[in-house]
Image: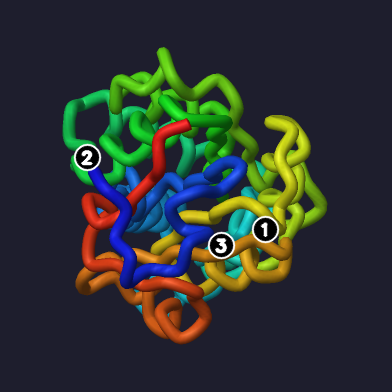
Amino acid sequence: MPPDLTLPPFVSNPDGVVFDLDGVLCDTEPLWAEARFAVAAEVGGRLAEEDFHRFYGANTPQWGSAMAEILGHPDADEIARRTIDRLEALYRSGRVQAIPAGVAAVRRAAARGPVAIASGSPRRIIATLIEILGLADVVDTYVSCDEVAGGKPLPDVYLEACRRIGIRPERSLAIEDSLAGARAGKAAGMSVVVVPLPGAPSSTGAAEVADVVLESLDELPLAAR
């Protein structure tokens, strides 16, 4: 794909690219919601849609604690474990909706330079999705917010991903769909490309934070090296 000269030059020629996962490479918010509602029912509690704003961008200890508090359950670790177990089962049942433009963009980026995934999902879930999406041959570096000090919008997960693949944040792209993720990429000093996920509450406000907003990652030009 030839570079689109209407976009800033840095978008087509970064040192490397770090992709968010949920909402960028696959639409998993509905399955996360299904898993959380099911766990709430199992423990005799109740979640409302507005509660989910506390979970966006959070790492597992953060959202596990928030979820346990809302449900009135004494063990946040158990709530997190149940949710992750149910989520993985949903993923492996074949219900993951891939975002083809995102998957193709990872392959284009990997063909020209370093790539990584930086996600709020646990490592086990990231690995499962990389397998399901057929990206294991091009993505071998991924960082979970569970491995750093805190979830998005803190910059930690992006900084660690850049460190692991040996790129400078200020010369690299963060690909996001959510407000929390866009803020994390900016805080890390990266240039942020946002592709809002239609209808996803987590995307609200992300476009205002981004350096570049695209309707699809098919529009992301990456110059050959």
Marks 3 and 1, Cα distance to the nearest angstrom? 6 Å
Q: CA distance from mark 3 to mark 2?
A: 20 Å
Residue receiving disc 1: 151
The tag earlier along the polypeptide, 3 or 1, is: 3
Q: Are marks 1 and 2 in contact (CB under 8 Å)?
A: no
Q: Amino acid at mark 2?
A: Ala
- Outermost residue toward the top? 137
- Total marks drawn? 3
- Disc number at residue 12? none
Earlier-in-chain disc, 1 versus 2: 2
Task: State which tag comes first along the sequence, 3 or 2.
Answer: 3
Residue at 42% of width from left, 72% of height from top?
A: 212
Depth order, front residue of 70/219: 219
Image quadrant where residue 62 sits: bottom right
Q: Is residue 73 visible?
A: no
Residue 225 in the image: above or below residue 56 = above
Q: Position of residue 81 (x, y in %)?
A: 56, 37
Residue farthest along the right direction in this orientation: 149
Residue annotated with mark 3: 57
Q: Are marks 3 and 2 in contact (CB under 8 Å)?
A: no
State the quadrant of the N terminus. top left
Q: Are marks 3 and 1 in contact (CB under 8 Å)?
A: yes
Query: Under tag 3, what secondary structure?
Result: loop
Amino acid type, mark 3: Gly
Q: Residue at x 36, y 72 (%)?
A: 213
Query: Which three-letter amino acid code belongs to the residue tagged 1?
Result: Gly
Label 2: which residue? 98
Determine the residue positioned at 39% across, 54% down.
36
- Secondary element under disc 1, as helix, strand or loop, is loop
- In the figure, is residue 185 to the left or right of 149? left
